[in-house]
Image (cartoon, helix red, strand yellow):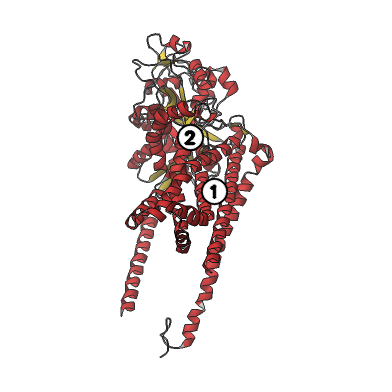
Amino acid sequence: MQAKSGISKITVMIIIYMIAVVAVGASYFLTSQNIIVLNGAGATFPEPLIKKWAFEYNEKNPSVVINYQGIGSGGGIEQIKRKLVDFAGTDAPVKDEEMTTGYLVHIPETIGAVVVAYNIPGLTGTLKLDGDTIAKIFLGNITKWNDVKIVALNPELSLPDQNIFVAHRSDGSGTTYIFTDYLSAVSQEWADEVGIGKSVGWPVGVGAQGNPGVAGLVRENPYSIGYIELAYAKIVNMTYAWIKNEFSGEFIEPTLESVSKAAEGFLEEMKEDVRVSIVNSPHPEAYPIASFTYILLYREQNVYGVRTNFEKSNALLNFVWWVVHEGQEYSEALLYPRLPPEVIVICEELLRSITYNGQPIITS
Amino acid sequence: MPPPLLFGKKGSKRARKILSGDSIFKKLTIIFALFILVLFLLIFYELYSRSQLSINKFGLGFLTGVEWDPVHQVFGALPFIYGTVTSSIIALIIAVPISLGIAIYLSELAPRRFRSPLSFMVELLAAVPSVVYGLWGLFVMVPWIRDYLQPFLESTLGFLPLFQGPKFGIGMLAGGIILAIMIIPTISAVSREVMLAVPDTQREAAFALGATRWETIRFAVLKYARTGIFGAILLGLGRALGETMAVIMVIGNRPQISLSLFEPAYTMSGVIASEYIEATQEIYLSALIEIGLLLFIITLIMNVFARLLVWRMMKMFRGAKE
């Protein structure tokens, strides 16, 4: 008797399970008919913004679903090269010679900025620094907070006679890329000894994982300095320095506006090639440690074989078009700078250059 | 009365048919067991083949190189090997006496009613995720090391180069201490099991000869269980060598070889976890995978060693019972 009732229970469960499978499958089949799924992967820095865009765009266009995975710029490039994703996100641009699987168009989607955060107990007022001084601190040439170079930039502050504790990222990151790009632009010594990269051979300092790790080190260690991505620094209320704009001589507070202006200093160069570095911007009000973060798209879209068709590429381009236009409305609320209008014009040109079987997709 | 049949209804034919399922089951489990071996070989092969580029370019110089510069593509693993080995040794120096103390108390001295709850708590500690240890380390232990331990060590043992240098809290010492805390549960739990396995006849014999409590523990228990305890220590060492997250959070992640324990250091698993995701150049990736290969080999050697010791100990027990 017992065995019998056990079997019948199992049978009932199997039937329920089968009904569920059929129902799920059928609903998927019914809805998948007219839904276009766009997959993207890459940089973690713009991930919250891209996810916000994906959500808002889907609200307006229920037939398009966008997925984005923040697996890192390197991973995103790898995946688009393997044709596993329809678009990739990257902080550092891809060079021509690295585009082994087809030309990748770079569409700037927003701008990243890096702040120099510090922790000096008892300091009243904001620390001001210039590029050369920051480079010397991170090279280990300046080791004390009351070094003449720092004091000269901050005559009104009483800086302590304490060793500087330097914190940097230990994981490979776009934040490190922007920061070292800036230091290489303003310091020949840095360019020669260390160079630019997502991971570099740091001459001094202690490494920590991610923005939270560096922020934690700076917060926990008195007399420390470190570099952090702007949005994160704002969210966790870090104290950060104003950086000297070498062209105007002004000390610039890192804000969404001053970061946005960094792009405006390079409009001519951008028309040539959008992959320009925008650190140390000549715009007089620009914050100098900034960089574009890009969406990567194949210039010829028909490279995905059976997984693609004109409708899908068209949906992809419409989404990116929306991102650089209406999508920008959502940027500042999430602490990302807006693209300047001139840059949006350049984005439009770039999007028009993208083709399907040699024919431009966006014609208007 | 014939014995009741476990399988089938009546006829022995059906019973035999089902019993022949035993051999199928046996073969199936052999396949599962072989799966482990295949997995192991695949991991080794994959690590080896994917680090070819780096092996060919740097050769043995990879083992002795002290520079790690992804920008200029110069890769040397020695600072990471040094960091992993040294932090693990510090961990053992701290953890072994404490763990043995715990194990001796729990197996020999603690009142019976305390033994189970205390043992349970030790095992519970082993189950805490390492990132939790790391967070605790960063926010509680590191400030304590910076404000109390390092000044104390410098003022008392500061004549040694080991205890000179910057007092950040973060560094090799912090890495070693966090590892020690993490391997204490492993070592003490296994050592306790080993000590409990020592036959009571050993203890009774020692008492009969007029030995004190201490002499009994020392000569009858510890001496008898020493290979097993050694195996427990090696298991702890294995965990210390491979531990990643907690160490990353407190060791400072700086590839350098310094005598000072106050200086930051870097471990092999740490650099892989930190840099793998954004390593885009082939040679960079290959160098990271080669570090993985080296770590795999080091851990393998430690584990084989531990296993052999445990086997030897088992043989001794069997010998003692006969």
- Tell whether B281 sits left or right of B138: right
Viewer-side residue, A46 vs A195? A195
Look at discs 1 and 2 and give the one toward the viewer. Answer: 2
The kind of residue on which mark 2 rests is Leu
Image coords of residue A273 (percent x, y): 54, 26
Give A75 or A133, whichever is nearer the viewer.
Answer: A133
Residue A92 visible in this rendered orientation of the protein: yes
- Quadrant, the N terminus of chain A: bottom left
Q: Position of residue B151 (x, y in %)?
A: 43, 27
Residue with the mark numbered 1:
A305
Q: Depth check: A364 or A85 in front?
A: A85
Q: Which residue lies most toward the front here? A: B210
Query: Could you say which quadrant of the image residue A8 lies in?
Result: bottom left
Q: Name the residue under label 2.
A: B173
Gap between marks 1 and 2 measured at Cα = 55 Å
Q: Residue at image x 50%, y 22%?
A: A138
User: Tags 1 and 2 in contact by the CB under 8 Å rule?
Assistant: no
Task: Give the position of the C terminus of chain A as an image quadrant.
Answer: top left
Residue A40 circle label: none
To the question of a shared chain for discs 1 and 2, the answer is no
Task: Name the spot of residue B246 as percent of width and height, x first.
Answer: 44, 40
Query: Residue A210, percent across and down?
Result: 44, 34
Q: Find the residue positioned furthest to the bottom.
A: B1
A115 vs A299, left or right, is: left
Looking at the image, can residue A33 be seen?
A: no
